[in-house]
Image (tube, rainbow, N blue to C red):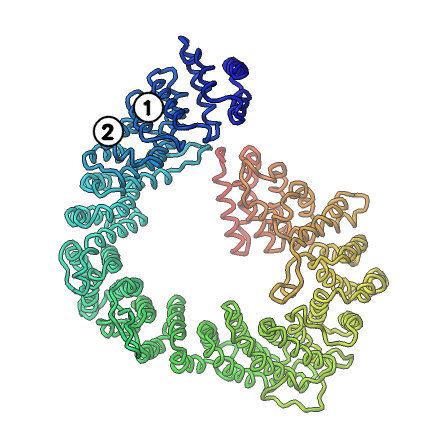
Amino acid sequence: MENTERLIRTWIATEKEEEVKEIVAEISADRTNFVNVVKGLGEYLTADEEDLRRKGVEFLSLILASLPTEKVNKQSTRVLSTFYCGKLEDFGTVIPALKGIQTLVKLPTCSALEVQSILRSMFSHVRVKGLVQSVRFVVFSILDSLVANHREVLQAMGKEFLDGYVGLADGEKDPRILILAFAIARVILIEFDIRERIETLFNITFCYFPITFRPPPNDPYGISADDLRNALRGCLSATPYFGPLAIPVFLEKLLAGTRVSKRDTLETMGICLPVYGSALAQAEGRKLWNSLKLEIFQPTDTANQEEALRTTQILVKTIYEADKSAENDTDIKGLARDACEECISILKEPEKSQANAAAKVLCAFMSTTPSVAKYTISQAIPHLVKLFHSPDEAGNRGPILTVLSEFIITARDSSSKLSSQPARTDDDMEIESTVPPLLPYKDSVLGVLTVGLKTASSRRPALAGLQGMVTSENLLNDAELTFVVHNVNEIMEAAADDPDGTSAVLDLLSTVSNINARIVEEQALPLLFSSIPDVPPARDAIQERVKILDALSALEALCIQAQLFETMVIRLTTKLDLICVPNSTTIEELELYAAYAHWILTTVVKTLQKKIDKDHPDVAKYIDRLVPKLFNLLVSAAFTVSDETRVATDHRLVKKAGELVTLVVQTLPLERQESYAALLYDALLGGNIKPISEGQQKIASDKKLLVLSDSAPIVQKNLLALFTAVIISLRKEVQPVVSDLNAFLDNLVQWSLTRAESAFQRDAALELLASILNKHADSLEDFLDHLLSSFWDREIRDIEVAPQRRRNAIKAWSWASKALLIRNHPIASQFIDKLFEVFHDETIGWDAARIVGEVAAPDDVLTKKHHAVIRILYAQKFLNSVLPKITTSAKDSRVPREQTASLVALTSLIKSIPKPTYQHELQALIPLLIRGLELPDTDIRLNIIDTFLVAAEGDSPEHCLITGHAPTLVDLMLKNSNMTEMPSLRVRISALKFLQKLPSIVRYDILHPSKPFVMKELGKALDDPKRVVRKEAVDARASWFAYHGST
C-alpha cells in the first residue's frame, strides 16, 4: 500500500508514464489491487482544487485503460460506473471521466444497468458543443462501443436513447467525428424503432446533404469528401421512413444546386429510391421525372446527364419491379408509358439535338424491367422503322439509323435481364433459353439496315446496327447471317474510301467469322482474293495498288480464326508461287514483283502474330504446312540463278520469310523443335535441303545447298538469314546438331569477316552467333578464350588490319558481348573491358564507344519470346560497373581522344537503358551530356537531346534537374534548331521540342534574361523549309510567349 501511495504521489507531481506502468504491473502480479489504488487516490479525488481532482480521475482512467480486462470484476465495474457518472457532474473532471468510461464500456463485465446509468449521465451532464474535437471524439467512441456491444439495452431505452443521441449529435461539424456519427446513425435507423422520431433524425442527418467538405492540405487523417459522402448516403438510404421527407429535398437540390451538388444529389437518389420503395416512387414519380428530364435534355455536362439517366433507370425499376404480373405484357401504364410516349414524340424529328437525349432515355428504359423493356421496344422500333420508310424523312435516314443502332445495342446488352421462356432438351428437361427482345422485329429492322448500307450518309450507323444484331444471342440464324455478309460484300468497295467505314465492315465480318467461319469463307473471302491479281500493278497504277493493299489489310483483319487462316495461307502461298517463279526481265519489273511478294508475306506475318498474341493452338501445325513451302520457294530460286535476278532471291523477301518462320518455330513444343533442328542443321551444314523443303518448285535430288561454302553464290549466302530465323527461336534445351560447337562458331565469325558479301549476310551470321552463344555459353569456353586472346589481338587491336574489317570484327565482338551480358555470364565483364582499350584508336575508337553503350540495349534477337537466357537487373549491374569508368575518362582531359570517345559511350549508354536505371546519376551526368552536344556526330547530339527530353518528364519548376544548366542548354538547343548550323532534320525537331518543354520545368527567374533572344532565334526556325520543323517552332515560340513570372 505504501508503494502504491508513493507511486500515486509521484505521478500527481510529474505525470510520467512510468508510474502508471509500474502500478499496472503491481496489480497484474497481485501485489496490490484496484481498491488500494482508489484508496490512495482518495484525497485527490475529493480535493477542493480542480486540478488535483482532474489528475486523480485521469490517473484512475489511465490505470483502467492499461489493466488486463480480467483484473476488473463486475463489482469493480459497477463501482467505477457510479464513480465516473458522478464525476461527469463536475465540469473539471468531465474529460478524464469520459476517457475512463471509454475503457469501461468495452469491458465484458459492463452490464445493462451500468450502460443505462452511463448514458443517462452523459445525456444529462455532457455538453458536447463546449468540448474540443478530441474529447467529442471520445464521446462518439463511447456511443459507438455501446451500439456495437449493447444494442439491445439501447433499443430497450427507446425514445430516451434516441432523444439523448440527437442532443449529442446535433450540430457536429468535425469530419473525423462525422464519419463515426454517420456509422452510428445508420445502425440506429436500421435496427431501432424510430417511427416517433423520424423527423428529428431526418433533420440531424439531411442537414449535411449535400457534402461540400474540402480536406485541408496535408490532412493527417486522410478523410476525403467521398468518405463523408458515402457515409452520409449510408444514413440517408438506411430507412424507407425518410422517403416522404427526402424527395422534396432532392428536388430542391436538383433545381437550385451547383453542377457538383446536382451530381451528388443524382447519385444519392439512385441509392435511396430502391430503399424508399415502389409506393413512394409511384406517388412522386412524375415530379422526379420532371426534374430528371431537365438534367437529361438540358444537361450542365455529360457526366450529370449520364447520372440522370442512371437515376431514371432506378426510378422506373423501383416503380415497376414489384409488379410481376406485367412481366409478359407489352403494355404498361403510369410514368414509363408517359415518358416513353414523350420521347417517341421527340424522335419524330431525329435530326434535332433533343432526339439524341430522347433516344438515351428510351435506351435506359430498356435496361430496367422486362415489362418496361418490352413496351419500349414495341413502341420505339416500329416507330423508327416507319420513320425510315417515310418519303418525308429521306434526308434524315442517317440520324434515324443512328438512333435505331443505339436501340439494337442496348437491347442486346439488356437481353439477359429480360424474361426467359422455357425450352426442353431431349430428356424432357426444362432449360432456360434467352429470348432476344428484338426477335419480333428482326425482319423489319434487318431490312432497314441493309437499305441503309447502300447510302454513304447512313452506312456507318447501319453497320453499327448490324454489328449489334449479329452479336445478339439467338437472334439471327445462319441464313440471315449469310444475308448480312452478302449485303456487306456489296458495299465493301464503296466503303474503301472511308477508313472508319472499312473498319466497321471488317469488325462486322470478323464477328460473323467467330460465329460461323464458313459463311465468311464462302461469301467474303472470294471477293477479297479476287482483288489480288497474279501480277503486280504498274508503278503508276496508284488505284490498283491501293485496292490490293486494302484487300490484304482486310484479309489480315478477318483471317485470324483457324479455318479462315488456313484458307488464307493456301491462297496466298499459291499467289507467291505465281509471283516469284517467273523470271523478270528488267530491274523495274523485279522491284515491282518483289514488293508485291513482300506485301503478301507481310500480311501473313501480321496475321500470324495476331494469332500468337491470342494463343491460338493451330499455329504450330504450320511448321509442316507453310514453312516447307517457303524453303522450297526460296531455295529453288537460289539454285536457279547465281545473282539477284529473280524475285524470290531478293534479300528483303528472305528477311520477311525469316520473320514468319521465327513466329512458327517459337511456338513449337520442345520435342518438335528438337526433331526439326536436326533436319535444319543437316540442311545448313550438309546441304540436305529436301526434308525441310516441299512445294511446287522442283529441286534436283543431287543439289546441295552449301550456304557457308566459299564458292556459294550471293543468293545462296542470303539464305543464311532463313536458317538463323529458325535457330534463334529454338529453346535453350535444343542442342545444336554439330560435331564441334566451338569450331562451328569460330568458322561462323570468320565467315562473317571474309566470306559475307553484304551487311545482310553479316548480320545473319552474327545474330546466329549471339543466339547460340547466349543459350549454350557454358559449353563454349574454348571459343570464348579464343575470342579474348587471338581474335582480339589479330582482328581488332592490330592497326595493320584494314579499317572495314576491324569495324566488322568489333561488330562481331558486340554481339558476343551482348549474348554474355544479358545472361550475367562471369566473362562478360572481360569482353566489355577490352573495348575501353581501343577508345584511343583513331579508326575504331568511336565504334567501340558506341558498342559499350549499345550492348545493354534491347534488340529483336535475344528476347524472351525467342527463349534467350535473360537475367533480371542485368542492365542495372552493367551500368554500375561501366558508368564510373566512362565518367572518369570523360572528365580526364589529358587524353582528348579517349575523353571524346567516353562522351560517345556515355550518350550511347544513356540512350540504351531505361530512365529509372540511371536517374539517380543524372544530376552528375548533365555537364558531360552538355559537352556531348558540341560533338560533330548528329546521332550523338540526337541521343543527348532525347535523353534530356526523357529526363524532363515529371520535372517541375520546383524540382528540376537542369535548373543550373538551363541558360547553357537554351543556347545549345537554339544552335541545334537552326538549319544553317544543323543539317539533320531529326536533331532540329528534337531541339525545338526541348525548347518548348523548358518553360514548364524551369523557374522564370532563371530563364527570364534569355526570353527575348529565344523569341528572336525561334523566328528563324519559322522559316525552315521543312513543315514539321516549322510546326515545332510555332509550338516552342507559343510556349515561350506564355512564359511569365507565375511559372
Q: What residue type is labelled 2?
A: Glu
Point out the residue furthest to the top here: 48
Query: CA–CA distance between discs 1 and 2?
Result: 18 Å
Q: Earlier in the sequence, mark 1 or mark 2?
A: 1
Residue 793 lies, in percent from the top left, at 85, 61
Residue 758 lies, in percent from the top left, at 71, 72
For residue 625, side relative to residue 203 (left or right) = right
Residue located beneath label 1 in the image: 128
Say which of 202 and 196 sits in front. 196
Residue located beneath label 2 in the image: 160
Rendered view: 601 above or below 238:
below
Rendered view: 665 above or below 68:
below
Residue 714 lies, in percent from the top left, at 71, 79
Rendered view: 461 above or below 1017:
below
Where, by quadrant of the figure, is residue 819 drawn?
Answer: bottom right
For residue 470, side relative to residue 922 (left or right) = left
Q: Which amino acid does label 1 sit on?
A: Val
